[in-house]
Image (cartoon, rainbow, N blue to C red):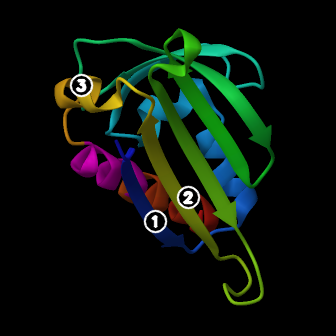
Amino acid sequence: MSPRITRVARTIEAPADIVWSLLTDAAGYADWNDAVISIDGPIALGNTIELVSIANPKRTFKLEVAELRAPEHMVWSDGMPMRLFTGRRTYSISEGPDNGAGRCEFTMVEEFTGPLAGLITKAIPDLTDSFNTFADCLKVAAESETTS
């Protein structure tokens, strides 16, 4: 069974460090992010955070901050023992000569894998709308910080 993947990308007219600061400030999500209802716990390597999303507001997801490389890469993950089902959300921010000064590319990818992925993902709603909301809100927040 092939993995289920949801992906969103945006060009953001702001430096990567501003985007990164928004992504890693759990307490500030409510100020800018309409896709996330709440995040509890600090976003730091090895920590577990509790996320409630508009995609499934009745469920709290307990996610490990599995990878953290400021200001360009972060992974949140959860899953079942023996990798029967795994969810990984990867955030990537890249700056470079093609992007110009003060501009970055933001990408967020969620991938569900494992032998039980086909069965479990049937109960997970389509994340496309919530991913687009997340990325659009991040873009607006980062760009408004740049102009203020």
The residue that label 3 is drawn on is 119
What is the three-letter code of the residue carrying label 2?
Ala
The residue range painted magenta reads 127-135
Q: Nearer the viewer, mark 1 or mark 3?
A: 3
Residue at (18, 24) in percent of width and height: 123
Q: Is residue 10 above or below residue 24?
A: below
Question: From this viewpoint, which residue is outermost toward the right?
Answer: 69
**What kind of secondary structure does the magenta stretch mostly adopt?**
helix
What is the three-letter code of the residue carrying label 3?
Leu
Q: Nearer the viewer, residue 13 or 144?
A: 13
Percent coordinates x, y for residue 104 in the rendering:
64, 72
All told, the count of numbered labels is 3
Residue at (65, 76) in percent of width and height: 103
Label 3: how many Cα within 10 Å (few below 14, some 14–19, many 20+): few
Name the image quarter holding residue 47: top right
What is the three-letter code of the residue carrying label 1?
Ala
Q: Which of 73 and 21 is in front in this view?
A: 73
Horizontal side of residue 113 vs 58, given as left or right? right
Residue 131: in magenta span: yes
Horizontal side of residue 41 vs 134, given as left or right? right
Mark 3: which secondary structure? Answer: helix
Q: Nearer the viewer, residue 77 or 147?
A: 77
Percent coordinates x, y for residue 111 in the rendering:
45, 42
**Mark 2 / mark 3, whichever is N-terminal:** 3
Q: In this view, does 7 lie above or below 32?
A: below
Mark 2: which secondary structure? Answer: helix
Q: In this view, does 66 lie above or below 70?
A: above
The residue that label 2 is drawn on is 142
**Mark 1 / mark 3, whichever is N-terminal:** 1
**Mark 1 / mark 2, whichever is N-terminal:** 1
Percent coordinates x, y for residue 113 in the rendering:
44, 35
The residue that label 1 is drawn on is 9
